[in-house]
Each structure stands twice: as C-alpha cells, then as structure tokens.
Image (tube, rainbow, N blue to C red):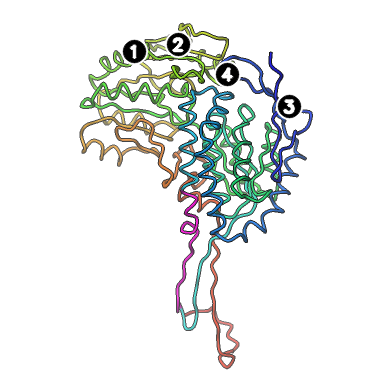
C-alpha cells in the first residue's frame, strides 16, 4: 500500500499541515484510504477568519482594474491546468475525468463573468434631486465571507462563490468538503499565482466543528452554502440568527416531463445522460421521469436498452462512462432505495445491485424503477445516486401538478416538439431552473443558479448577477455644497 499523503489548510497564502485530528479521504475507484485530511479546530477557523479580516482593508481598496487582472490571469491558469484539476477531482470523487474536466470548464465560466467586475459593481448617480442636491449610490463589499461547499463539485462550486466574492472586494474563508479537499487547495494556489494577495482567499478543511465556528464567528458577514436540504435549513437559521447574510442551497428532486409528441430516442438519450452522469451525484441530476400518456412503455424500453450498454469503471479509464459513488456508505444508501422499491409497489426494471463491476471500489450499477408514485421513499427522498424513477401520468396538467407539489424545486425539464406546450410549461411550473429539451438546465455564467421552495434558503441565487448583489451592500450618499449665506435653522422634515 502506498504511503498516505496529508492535506492541510491554506491560510495567508501558505500551505499548513494542520493539527492532529484528521479524517480519511478515499480513492472511490479502489476503496483505498489514500489521504488524511486535517480537520480544523474552532481556533484554526478563528485564526483563518482573522487573517482574512486583516487582508480585507487592503483588498477592498485595490483598484477594480487590478482585481480584474487577477481574474483574467486565473482564467488563463484554469485553462492551462484543467486536466490536472480534473484528475485531482477524479482521484478523490470518482467521476470520470472527462466529466471532471467539464466541471472545471463550468467553473471557469464564473471566473470569466467575474472579470467584468467593473460593470457589475457600477453605482448610480442622480443630479439635482432637490435644489443643489445630488444623490449617488455605491456598492461596497461586506468584509469576510464564508463559503461552505459540497463534495459533488469540489472545483466548480468553490469557483461559483469565490470568484464573485473576491471580485466584489471581500475576503474569503472557504471550507470545502472533507471527502475530496485537494481540488479547492489547488484552486487557492492558482489564485495566489494569479496575483491574489495573501489572506484574501483562505481554505480550512474540517467537519461540523469548522462549520459551526464559521457560522458563529461575528467577523464573518455572509455565508454561502450548497448541500442537503436539512443542513441548508440549519445553516440558514443559525447564521441568520447572528445577523449574517445567507444563501443556502439545499437538495433537489428534478423531474423530466416527456410529452406524447416528444422524440423518444432523444428523450431516452437525455434521460440516461442526466440521470446517471457522475453516478447521479449531481444536485441537477434528473431523478424522476414523468411519462405523459402513452409514451411510458416505449420510453422505459428505450432507456432500459441504453443502460445495459453503459460502461462503469475507474474514472481514469477513458472507456468508463460512469465512475463509483464517493463512499461505501453512499453505495449502501443508494442500494437500500432500490431494495425497498418493490415492497412499496414499484417495479424495478433494471437493478443496479446485480451488475458486476471489476475492482474493489464503491461501485454500483444503474437502476431504473417504474410505476413510482409520490409517497414512496424512492420518490420522496433525494437519493443522490444512479437511480431513475418513472412516474406515469395521463395528461400535461397532472404532470405540472405533480412537479409543483414537490417541496424541492431546483430544476425541471420538459421534452416536447410543440412550442405552445413549452411556453405554457415555462409559465405554469414552480421551479427555479427550467429546461426545454435540455435535461440539465444549469445556467451559463452570465445568469444565476438556484431553485425555489426548499431547494434554496435565502433571497439570492449563486453566481452570475445575483452573486454581486449578495456579496455587496449598497450605500446611498446625498450631497449638497451650499453657499454659506444659505445656512439656516429649520426643524421641519427635509423636502424638495
């Protein structure tokens, strides 16, 4: 067995080994415990926050053009190191390298958007609102912000948050998932190489102790989070209670509605791609296929035929289309939903537990479950694995009602060749991100990402235009330069 490596923290522009308390990081394709990650204490977190606070006055005064220069250099470095970062992701998360490279590319979009910070941070000015009185409004950074990111996108989600936060003039303490921490540390190194001053971006690895320390620290002004709905709700309540701004993105149960006029081969290809890509460990994965009318039988048949030909294996193998789940516990949890589906009255068309996959990693095959209904655990819960449920409904109206009744409203898609249906769907549906013949409607970097209902706690979505709203606060200045002879005492409320 190869000697384990150690992953520590990145504070003040330098790598730190961290203390004695550590957690395991596995290679999901082999099951091997490859790395020990330092788990930050509350004191470690406080120190990182203080370093970020000390760096804030200088960074907020850095000219916007110089901040933009850092973003442009970071964009270049991300492009140059895309394959390296992708392989780091694969070694700790398990997704195939091509998928990991796509993750880096989508994160790069957000860095590109942040390069336009000069435009995003523009204020407003109104002359002569009253006699000799002008008013202008400016955007100013908050201070130290905390970014708490999930395991399923260890590079993309940090880039979603960090790019906008530091472009707006804030300093950041990033707490990535302790399951796959190395990509975030590499990003921090690249930001330093791009010219970011020490202390502007700090990375602390850790578990609940580190998260709680960030939520309770009075110096931290805002918290960005992506994770499960129960944790998102808890973080929102705890951080908001201390007066912090919070955007906490929770779980999902994304539906894909297939209308009778849809091209079934295209719909089947899209369903397989969106349900099983990255082993279903995506917050925007399609987990429920809503078959409208008579399309159910031929659509299920097409999907079952396609999943039988998927290649599952080590993510570093170019032939692999899907890798393992991130931990053995995740594999057992996913398997339990398939095991219980029949008892709930569903039909397991393809059972991923039965597929034999080479190696000792955390692999499970893909599952297709038909005749699913609300109230079944396989429908109600966010499984976060390669399980696609099929719900059959007789009409468009019942499909819309089904989707709108779900508490999770992250993403939804409709497959149709009728423009009127697509337009009505866009209007009727109560979900934050909608795809028309697009199964995973993750917005490009110039728009913002976020769901509705219990998929988002807070008022603003992540990245894009709304991120600059979240990471800045507005200050309104009213100005008058009177002649001394105009001075007088007037106790009345000021008017025009």
Q: Identify residue for label 2.
A: 352
Say what secondary structure mark 1 lies in.
helix
Q: Identify residue for label 1.
A: 304
Distance between mark 1 and mark 3 Cα atoms: 43 Å
Crowding at dot 4, Cα within 10 Å, few <14 / some 14-19 / many 20+, comes out as many
Q: Earlier in the sequence, mark 2 or mark 3?
A: 3
Quarter holding the N terminus is: top right
Vertical order, 364 against 413 (above or below): above
Q: Earlier in the sequence, mark 4 or mark 1?
A: 4
Distance between mark 4 and mark 2 Cα atoms: 17 Å
The x and y percentages for residue 402 are 35, 29
Horizontal relation, residue 8 to residue 120: left or right: right
Q: Identify residue for label 4.
A: 28
User: Badges 3 and 4: C-beta atoms under 8 Å apart?
Assistant: no
The x and y percentages for residue 325 are 53, 19
Crowding at dot 1, Cα within 10 Å, few <14 / some 14-19 / many 20+, comes out as some
Query: Which residue range is magenta in the image?
Result: 113-129
Which of the 4 image quadrants contains residue 237? top right
Crowding at dot 3, Cα within 10 Å, few <14 / some 14-19 / many 20+, comes out as many
Residue 243 in view in this figure: no
Say which of 269 and 394 sits in front. Answer: 269
**Residue at 61% across / 45% down in the picture?**
193
Say what secondary structure mark 2 lies in.
helix
Residue 111 in view in this figure: yes
Q: Identify residue for label 3.
A: 22
User: Badges 4 and 1: C-beta atoms under 8 Å apart?
Assistant: no
Horizontal relation, residue 88 to residue 454: left or right: right
> Which numbered mark, 4 or 2, is in the foreground of this view?
4
Which label was assigned to residue 93? none
């Amino acid at each position: 067995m190869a000697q384990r490596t150690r992953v520590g923290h990145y504070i003040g522009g330098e790598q730190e080994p961290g203390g004695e308390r550590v957690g395991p990081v596995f290679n999901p394709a082999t099951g091997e415990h490859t790395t020990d990650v330092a788990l930050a204490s509350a004191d470690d977190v406080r120190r990182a926050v203080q370093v970020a606070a000390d760096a804030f006055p200088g960074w907020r005064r850095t000219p916007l053009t110089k901040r933009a220069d850092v973003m442009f250099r970071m964009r270049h470095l991300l492009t140059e190191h895309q394959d390296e970062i992708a392989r780091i992701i694969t070694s700790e998360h398990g997704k195939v390298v091509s998928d990991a490279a796509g993750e880096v590319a989508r994160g790069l979009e957000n860095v590109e958007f942040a390069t336009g910070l000069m435009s995003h941070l523009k204020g407003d000015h109104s002359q002569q609102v009253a006699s000799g009185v002008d008013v202008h409004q400016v955007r100013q950074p908050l201070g130290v912000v905390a970014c708490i990111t999930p395991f399923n996108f260890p590079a993309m989600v940090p880039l979603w948050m960090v790019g906008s936060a530091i472009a707006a003039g804030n300093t950041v303490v990033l707490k990535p998932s302790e399951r796959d921490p190395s990509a975030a540390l590499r990003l921090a190194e690249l930001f330093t190489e791009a010219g970011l001053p020490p202390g502007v971006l700090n990375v602390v690895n850790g578990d609940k102790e580190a998260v709680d320390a960030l939520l309770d620290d009075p110096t931290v002004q805002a918290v960005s989070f992506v994770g499960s709905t129960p944790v998102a709700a808890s973080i929102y309540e705890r951080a908001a209670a201390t007066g912090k701004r919070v955007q906490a993105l929770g779980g999902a149960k994304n539906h894909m509605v297939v209308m009778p006029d849809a091209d079934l081969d295209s719909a089947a290809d899209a369903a397989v791609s969106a349900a099983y890509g990255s082993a279903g460990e995506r917050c925007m994965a399609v987990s429920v296929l809503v078959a409208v009318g008579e399309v159910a039988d031929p659509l299920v048949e097409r999907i079952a035929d396609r999943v039988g030909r998927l290649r599952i294996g080590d993510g570093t193998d170019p032939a692999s289309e899907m890798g393992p789940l991130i931990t053995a516990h995740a594999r057992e949890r996913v398997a339990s939903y398939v095991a219980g589906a029949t008892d709930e009255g569903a039909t397991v068309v393809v059972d991923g537990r039965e597929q034999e996959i080479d190696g000792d990693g955390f692999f499970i095959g893909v599952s297709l479950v038909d005749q699913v209904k609300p109230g079944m655990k396989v429908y109600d819960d966010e499984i976060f694995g390669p399980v696609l449920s099929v719900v059959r409904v007789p009409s468009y109206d019942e499909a819309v009602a089904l989707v709108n009744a779900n508490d999770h409203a992250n993403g939804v898609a409709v497959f149709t060749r009728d423009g009127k249906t697509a337009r009505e769907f866009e209007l009727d549906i109560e979900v934050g991100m909608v795809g028309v013949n697009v199964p995973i409607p993750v917005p490009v970097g110039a728009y913002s990402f976020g769901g509705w209902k219990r998929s988002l706690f807070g008022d603003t979505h992540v990245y894009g235009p709304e991120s600059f709203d979240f990471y800045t606060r507005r200050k309104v200045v009213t100005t008058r330069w009177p002649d001394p002879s105009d001075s007088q005492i007037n106790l009345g409320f000021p008017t025009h």
